Image (cartoon, rainbow, N blue to C red):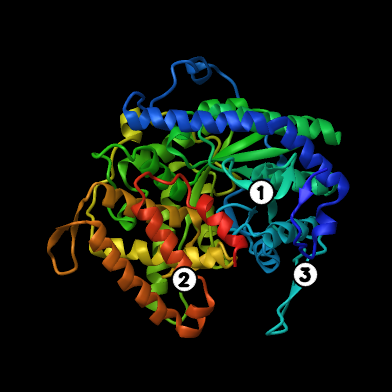
């Protein structure tokens, strides 16, 4: 049997039953070897890209899939209208508020917006178990306010962690189980039949895929899990986030490999920006401008999103838009109006392009996004009829470099957000409101990867006083010290001393100045969760 961590979260016995553990063990033993091969293939391909011996493009060996006529399996009835989806971690209060938000879908997240402490992972599964059975409630200890589900709630989807992550608290044959199999397996085992009894199903979002072979692995996981639990083939359904640059060249192929289990693709814009920087890090001509200047209007981002719409609708699959990271701003009408105007413009672009729905990070944005999509959809539930045959996207279009400037303001913002976020993540919170935006691991990845890229190429940065200066490690370290002090002033000594800001600063500086780019910040950060 699997070995579990000696620490015992409150819900451990309820979630990690012997039968549930045996199910995850079987998935692990059966699929972990292939996963290791896929991760090795990722690394080998990245090495070829770094060396210049491979250039990203549409695959010749799968051209027959792209030109053939085929569609994905019919979409379940309760997923036909997904015009607004809200996302957030599997915190008990968050689950209730999100399900009650008025959005059509809530994506409960074990990935970028969750700090994967063992307590968070186990309690998250318990919270979902209760939510599926409509037995979830919560009372705020400080205010006494009670939270319960409304009669009508959003459809529930679950996002397991990415293929690159392990769960160190669940050992199978002495080795940590793949985190995605833990998250996927426990939710399916405990809830599939109850969901079906309630006329819905076990629905998932799959993150950070880089190839159709990884999609094939997930399809095999779904199929085997269904057979093991006695579920009909195609019971488990998924939406795949196209949030890596390599995956943008394999959208047709990903849909094809998962065609009996998939319902659509999603534009995971923030991770996509991070992935683009990471994948093309060896190309000195592919240095990005300030994060704030890389908008969805950039030609490379327009190519990515419109190609996704065309590809999905040709195959009868949904094309979901990306996250609006803005959050409502209390006490400042002007700033709040400006934030909501950005959300409206973003959602108007998405709906006008043909997206079937979109993401928001805060319940307060649900009515704004609903209004925009209602204007475009009218009486329709989705835009599967919008073919976008006008879209023609080349590899060069996807690989174009966004225009813009590199500034001291942008650099300092990256440092401050990165340190703030890592401190919260290390303290167990993976979804953090900072400077009018909701930040998660994806946006933190942009921050540190941009700093690494700018330092690696010693780019010219426009300073606040108008001077142009080459970015050196010394300049960066001085700025990091300044921003660290500013964060302390911002949060106050008591909170600062009680927090994990020094560890966050050290990790951010180490990742930014490393000679070799670290693939994901959560990999070196994960062991630190258990050292405090």
Location of residue 235 (image quadrant): top right
Q: Position of residue 140 (x, y in %)?
A: 70, 79
Q: Could you tell me residue 53's position as x and y percent?
A: 34, 23
Q: Quadrant of residue 114?
A: bottom right
Residues at marks 3 and 1 touching, judged by CB atoms closer than 8 Å: no
Q: The N terminus lies in which quarter of the figure?
A: top right
Nearest to the eye among marks 3 and 1: give it: 1
Separation of marks 3 and 2 at Cα, in angstroms: 33 Å
Q: What residue is shown with label 3?
A: 137
How many residues crowd around disc 1 within 10 Å: few (fewer than 14), some, or many (20 or more)?
A: many
Query: SS at mark 3?
Result: strand
Density class for disc 3 (Cα within 10 Å; few <14, some 14-19, many ≥20) is some
Give the labeled residue for mark 1.
Answer: 167
Position of 151 relative to 268 (above/below) = below
Residue 182: percent from the left, percent from the top?
71, 46
Q: Which mark is residue 277?
A: none
Find the distance from the CA under tag 3 to the CA under tag 1. Answer: 28 Å
Quadrant position of residue 19? top right
Is residue 159 visible in the rendered image? The answer is no
Q: Residue at x 47, y 60 (%)?
A: 325
Q: Marks 2 and 1: CB-CB under 8 Å? A: no
Mark 3 touches mark 2? (CB < 8 Å): no
Q: Give me the C-alpha separation between circle 2 and circle 1.
A: 25 Å
Q: Of helix, strand and loop, which one carries label 2?
A: helix
Find disc 2 in the rendering and name its residue: 501
Question: Residue 460, image x and y in percent?
Answer: 18, 53
């Amino acid at each position: 049997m699997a070995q579990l961590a000696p620490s015992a979260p409150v819900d451990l016995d309820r979630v990690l039953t012997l039968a549930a553990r045996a199910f995850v063990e079987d998935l692990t033993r059966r699929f972990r070897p292939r996963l290791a091969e896929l991760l090795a293939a990722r690394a080998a391909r990245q090495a070829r890209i770094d060396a210049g011996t491979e250039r990203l493009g549409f695959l010749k060996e799968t051209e027959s899939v792209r030109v053939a006529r085929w569609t994905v399996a019919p979409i379940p009835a309760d997923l036909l209208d997904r015009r607004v989806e809200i996302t957030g971690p599997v915190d008990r209060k968050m689950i209730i508020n999100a399900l009650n938000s008025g959005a059509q879908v809530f994506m409960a997240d074990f990935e970028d917006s969750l700090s994967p402490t063992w307590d968070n992972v186990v309690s998250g599964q318990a919270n979902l178990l209760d939510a599926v059975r409509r037995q979830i409630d919560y009372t705020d200890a400080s205010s006494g306010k009670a939270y319960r589900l409304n009669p009508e709630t959003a459809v529930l989807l679950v996002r397991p962690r990415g293929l690159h992550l392990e769960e160190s608290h669940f050992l199978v044959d002495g080795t940590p189980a793949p985190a995605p199999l833990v998250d996927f397996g426990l939710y399916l085992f405990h809830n599939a039949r109850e969901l079906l009894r309630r006329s819905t199903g076990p629905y998932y979002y799959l993150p950070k895929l880089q190839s159709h072979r990884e999609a094939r692995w997930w399809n095999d996981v779904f199929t085997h899990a269904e057979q093991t639990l006695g579920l009909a083939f195609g019971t488990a359904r998924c939406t795949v986030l196209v949030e890596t640059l390599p995956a943008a060249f394999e959208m047709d192929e990903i849909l094809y490999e998962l065609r009996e289990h998939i319902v659509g693709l999603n534009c995971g814009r923030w991770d996509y920006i991070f992935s683009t920087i990471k994948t093309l890090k060896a190309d000195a001509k592919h240095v990005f401008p300030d994060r704030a200047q890389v908008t969805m209007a950039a030609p490379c981002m327009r190519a990515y999103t419109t190609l996704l719409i065309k590809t999905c609708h040709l195959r009868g699959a949904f094309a979901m838009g990306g996250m609006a990271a803005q959050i409502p701003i209390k006490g400042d009408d002007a700033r709040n109006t400006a934030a909501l105007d950005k959300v409206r413009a973003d959602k108007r672009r998405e709906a006008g392009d043909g997206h079937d729905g979109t993401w928001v990070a805060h319940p307060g944005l649900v009515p704004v996004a609903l209004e925009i999509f209602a204007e475009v959809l009218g009486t329709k539930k989705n835009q599967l009829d919008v073919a976008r045959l006008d879209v023609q996207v080349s590899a060069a279009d996807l690989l174009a470099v966004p225009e813009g400037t590199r500034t001291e303001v942008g650099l300092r913002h990256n440092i401050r957000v990165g340190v703030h976020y890592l401190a919260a993540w290390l303290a167990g919170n993976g979804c953090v409101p900072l400077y009018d935006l909701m930040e998660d691991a994806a946006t933190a990845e942009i921050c540190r990867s941009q700093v690494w890229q700018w330092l690696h190429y010693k780019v010219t940065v426009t300073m606040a006083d108008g001077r142009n200066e080459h970015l050196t490690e010394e300049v960066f370290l001085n700025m990091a010290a300044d921003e660290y002090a500013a964060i302390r002033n911002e949060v106050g000594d008591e909170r600062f001393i009680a927090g994990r800001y020094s560890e966050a600063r050290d990790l951010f500086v180490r990742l930014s100045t490393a000679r070799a780019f670290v693939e994901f910040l959560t990999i070196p950060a994960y062991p630190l969760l258990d050292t405090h």
